[in-house]
């Protein structure tokens, strides 16, 4: 099964900013991660509203991992970006079994199990270990006004 | 997260054929489930190779749920149709953290938890209960040669 593109981007952005010791910018993130700038900007805004990032406007502005965001979980980020959609769509096309089906409940249980694993993984844990030094290298950009 | 279109179709086809008391055909399935005939034909073929369905050629031919397929699990069907892809793609675009990242292992654990739930759900269980009579109504087509 697949996570959507925005969720994928949100997780990459969270990981890179978590390990960076200095602020970065939307442009830097777009370059480092080879992602479209406009989409990065939207994901950064949503991560800011979630409390994962802080964004600072102006000449010395930028994007930074929020101070206590290390305590937030991967599960929280995934839920926010995946939305409430179910694993399959009973409406597209309209399934004749919709509303009267045992599979749907089982898929919800499976989805809950998936998220439960990620609810135990904190964003702060992702940047440690062997990935740490690499992330720090990536995360030391110049601040652009 | 989402299952792919073929997996979704495979599960619907498995449920409808599991409850049908008579053979059906690719055309009947495509009509009942409002799905494209050519795609249904491909999914039926794959389900036949998996042992979920039997297909009978010729004038009195058709498609039927295989005799012991009730013992097969939703997990087996999902694994077969989802393939070995991971939940996110570290290569598209190439993530600078690829190969040195803690998130990937956690996503694999989450995916394993998802499949573990479905490994305990047998195809034969999906057609029982209140969905039974509805499925039998849908599953009594004429046999076309």
Image: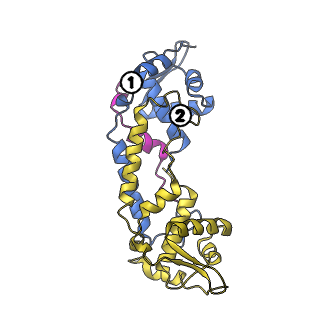
Chain colours: A yellow, B blue
Q: x%, y% of residue B128?
A: 36, 25
Residue B23 is at least partly visible in this image: no
Disc 2 crowd rating (10 Å Cα; few below 14, some 14-19, many 20+) is: many
Of the residues under marks 2 and 1, which one precedes in the sequence? 2
Q: To which chain does the residue with label 1 belong?
A: B
Q: How many marks?
A: 2
* Image quarter of residue A126: bottom left
Residue occupying image coordinates x 41% and y 48%: A111
Quadrant where the C terminus of chain A is found in the figure = bottom right
Instruction: Verify whether residue B97 appears in magenta.
Output: no
Q: To which chain does the residue with label 2 belong?
A: B
Tell whether B103 sits left or right of A89: left
Seen in the picture, residue B116 relative to B69 is either above or below; the reply is below
Seen in the picture, residue B94 relative to A64 is either above or below; the reply is above
Q: x%, y% of residue A125?
A: 38, 72
Along the viewing direction, whichever of B9 and B41 lies nearer the viewer: B9
Tell whether B145 sits left or right of A120: right
Q: x%, y% of residue B111?
A: 40, 53
Magenta part of the chain: B67-89
Along the viewing direction, whichever of A107 and A135 lies nearer the viewer: A107
Asked if the residue at tag 1 contacts the one at tag 2, i.e. Cβ–Cβ closer than 8 Å, the answer is no
Q: x%, y% of residue B17?
A: 45, 24
Cα distance in 3D space between marks 2 and 1: 26 Å
The numbered disc on residue A5 is: none
Residue marked by disc 2: B43
Residue marked by disc 1: B130
Q: Secondary structure at mark 2?
A: helix
Disc 1 crowd rating (10 Å Cα; few below 14, some 14-19, many 20+) is: few
């Amino acid at each position: 099964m697949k996570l959507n593109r925005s969720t994928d981007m949100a997780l990459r952005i969270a990981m890179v900013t978590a390990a960076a010791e200095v602020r970065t910018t939307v442009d830097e993130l777009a370059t480092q991660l080879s992602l479209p700038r406009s989409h990065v900007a939207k994901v950064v805004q949503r991560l800011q509203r979630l409390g994962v990032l802080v964004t600072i406007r102006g000449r010395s502005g930028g994007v930074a991992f929020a101070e206590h965001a290390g305590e937030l979980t991967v599960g929280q980020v995934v839920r926010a970006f995946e939305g409430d959609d179910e694993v399959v769509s009973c409406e597209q096309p309209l399934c004749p079994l919709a509303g009267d089906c045992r599979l749907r409940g089982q898929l919800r249980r499976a989805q809950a199990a998936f998220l439960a694993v990620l609810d135990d993984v904190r964003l702060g844990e992702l940047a440690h270990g062997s990935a740490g030094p690499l992330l720090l290298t990536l995360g030391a950009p110049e601040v652009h006004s």
